[in-house]
Image: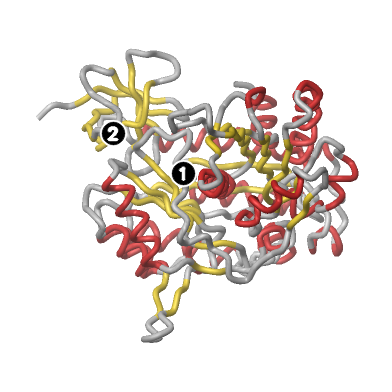
Amino acid sequence: MTNDAIIEESIQGTATVLKNTLQPENKHKKVYIETYGCHMNFSDSEIVASILKDQNYITTDNEYDADLLFINTCSIRDKAEQTVRNRLNQLKNIKKKNSKVKVGILGCMAERLKTKLLEEEQLVDMVVGPDSYRKLPEMIDETNTGQKSVNVFLSKEETYEEIRPVRLNTNGVSAFISIMRGCDNMCSFCVVPFTRGRERSRDPFSILAEAKDLFDRGYKEVCLLGQNVDSYSWKNPETNININFADLLRMVAETDQSLRVRFSTSHPKDITDQVLHTINKHDNICNYIHLPVQSGNSEVLERMNRTYDRAWYMERIKAIWNIIPDCAISTDIITGFCGETEAQHKDTLSMMEFVKYDLAYMFKYSERPGTLAEKKYADDIPEQVKRNRLNEIIEKQQKHSEHRNKKHLNEVFLVLIEGVSKRSKEHLFGRNDQNKIVIFPKGKHKIGEYVNVFVNRCTSATLFGDVVYN
């Protein structure tokens, strides 16, 4: 893949259609849900499916067969919003063929643009913010009377903790568990605090119940989700005992030793040694941390309002290496942020050299309306300069990913099988506990099994090997 292709793949929105895992019956109404953006959005779509299931809806992956068409949106970058608008234009043909179908916009873009979506996109019947999903039945009823419906109220309490998500588009092996909602960090480039509201944590016992239920149903891995999992905090109102993220991580890991536990995303200012020691102590907590750096320069980090500097971030990396020596580390990088000089860009490159990340999600800065950066700083880096810098970052990361993967040659990893390889039906793929994709011959093995795989070759993205039999 060329660098230009990688750049385009990095900056454009991607969609997931939640496929029906229930047996369809004629009496059911059907909902088509298309999800853009992060794992949090995917988790929200499963909550929506659960709420609608109680209203006699099943999901379908056929948009022409649906009574409801929902687009769950992302506002992190302008490219993602434009992708959604283009997709809405494509859906106009469905509305022309079936005037009774209702179209709704869910999630962050719905909250950010509110009634503007109804005015500009005549196709849209409902605009539903991320804290308003419980109101969907009433909103659907409202549209059935010929009215448009909008609810983007942001709650200080909503966590959907008692709702068991309908697991859709699933391999039956891995599942997401949302442990908190919202964000208090107020990074200057980010719209999340405005579209998802203030931070609030779920009752840990509802999380444990969900993890146990998934394990009892045959799932082998859970991923705990939050905008900043390290700031998870729940206080028992009766005993005043506070449970932090390290406590929660331990509690979920102790559900069963054969249940793998992952989490995303950590914040450099909040990840503690207690969390790192908890990971190291429990074999079933994966040795993988996603720790967004965004920039390697302290002045840029200050403008981003990241509340840490270069030295703090490097200290946290050293702590990870010291406590979890074989931990894989991935990151997010934004290049071309307001006022970024060439020297500051080189600080990001030098940070990459220091860490040598296993994986990175790399983007050029996209100004978002309503953020502190949009109000306070000029988006003054020329587009071509942004693209050139992103090219440099991608090229360096490809080398580092290959470097990290080559270190795994001739090692044996415990791999949880997730599916059949896209390139060969005779091969399976899974991940080791460092979140590395491993591909190996199928043999008689099945999805959901653990196998030991000896790695004998690699690319910058994938490990390849053969199953080792005792």
Residue on which disc 2 sits: 448
Badge 2 vs badge 1, beta-carbon distance below 8 Å: no
Toward the viewer: 432 or 53? Answer: 53
Nearer the N terminus, badge 2 or badge 1? 1
* Quadrant in which residue 425 is drawn: top left
Structural distance between the alpha carbons of marks 2 and 1: 19 Å
Q: Which mark is residue 166?
A: 1
Q: Residue at x 49, y 50 (%)?
A: 355
Query: Where residue 179 sits: x, y (%)?
Result: 47, 60
Query: Where residue 247 sits: x, y (%)?
Result: 35, 69
Query: Where residue 429 sits: x, y (%)?
Result: 36, 26
Toward the viewer: 35 or 2? Answer: 35
**Horizontally, is 184 left or right of 244 in the view?**
right
Type of the residue with mark 1: Val
Type of the residue with mark 2: Gly
SS at mark 2?
loop
Residue 340 visible in the shown view: no
Image quadrant where one finds the C terminus: top left
Q: Nearer the viewer, mark 2 or mark 1?
A: 1
Residue 284 visible in the shown view: yes
Q: Residue at x 24, y 33 (%)?
A: 449
Is residue 303 depicted above or below 177 in this figure? below
SS at mark 1?
loop
Toward the viewer: 253 or 68? Answer: 68
Is residue 239 depicted above or below 145 in this figure? below
* Quadrant in which residue 155 is drawn: bottom right
Toward the viewer: 232 or 100? Answer: 100
